[in-house]
Amino acid sequence: MPRILAIANRKGGVGKTTTTVNVATAMAATGKKVLVVDLDPQGNASTSMGVSKKGSMPSSYDVLIGKVKLSQAVVWTEIPNFSLIPSSPDLAGAEIELVDVDDREFRLKQALGKDAVNYDYILIDCPPSLSLVTINALVAADAVIVPLQCEFLALEGVTDLIRNINVIKKRFNPALALHGVVLTMYDKRNNLSQMVEDDVRSFFGKKVYNTVIPRNVRISEAPSHGKPVLLYDFKCPGSQAYISLAGEVLKREKELIAC
């Protein structure tokens, strides 16, 4: 069975999608079979991989409501070992549609359990809210990766997320773990970035990855070309940081599985 990692933060614009597609790309480059599930109605992970959200192709929304099997919504990317379940704007209304459905929190878990056995890793790009869609991701996941932007109010939002994770763990998914916190948009010229890093490492300790993702214009440019930054500019600091982060994630995976 695959390991399932949710990339989540209730705050928008912190690098969830960028982290998802680039860690997935780096994993795929090592030979891991990776599936990215785009659960954000905005569909940024789909755009970042050059997959159009227009047209009638099946999406993660169709999987959630049970309209199609997971395998019917898979799109293969140009990257070997990397496939994607694209998003749909209809996800914004999924909470209303699922409100009267039995086991509505387990819809994604059930879909993945039936039809995703051929992958090594599944990475779920979550929307920036604690909606029923996000709850589905956390119920399905083995662990959560939390991207945290290096801003002063970022820690407040993350502590709220940790409380939410603990509630999900208590009610629906006892095995759910905090995989780690990754600092994003780090500017070493800015004292604020260092202050936030110090606070986060003091609060979360070893759960914070050693790798920090720098503020890098090439990371920002890559989605407009429909590519992860690792393909857009392999040598830029952002790409090298995500390669390092993926290495840390895989190393921590071995430690978690061994426990």
Image (cartoon, rainbow, N blue to C red):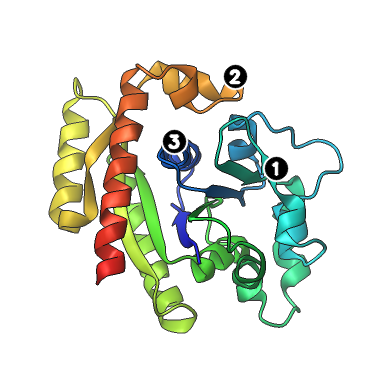
Going from the N terminus, do you reach mark 2 or mark 3 first? 3
Would you name the residue on which mark 3 appears?
29
**Which amino acid type is shown beneath numbered disc 2?**
His
Labelled pair 1, 3 in contact (Cβ < 8 Å): no
Helix, strand, or loop for circle 1? strand
Looking at the image, residue 160 lies above or below residue 213:
below
Going from the N terminus, do you reach mark 1 or mark 3 first? 3
Helix, strand, or loop for circle 2? helix
Where residue 29 appears, as percent x and y from the top left, is 44, 35
Residue 151 in sight here: no
Give the spatial CA distance, label 1 vs label 3: 18 Å
Q: Is residue 141 left or right of residue 95?
A: left
Residue at horizontal 33 percent and vertical 46 percent from the top? 154
Where residue 98 appears, as percent x and y from the top left, is 74, 71
Helix, strand, or loop for circle 3? helix
Labelled pair 2, 1 in contact (Cβ < 8 Å): no
Q: In which quarter of the image is residue 91?
A: bottom right
Give the class, few, some or many, for how many residues have Cα within 10 Å of label 1's Cα (few <14, many ≥20). some
Going from the N terminus, do you reach mark 2 or mark 1 first? 1
Would you name the residue on which mark 2 appears?
225
Marker disc for residue 4: none
Would you name the residue on which mark 1 appears?
75
**Which amino acid type is shown beneath numbered disc 1?**
Val
Where residue 100 appears, as percent x and y from the top left, is 76, 79
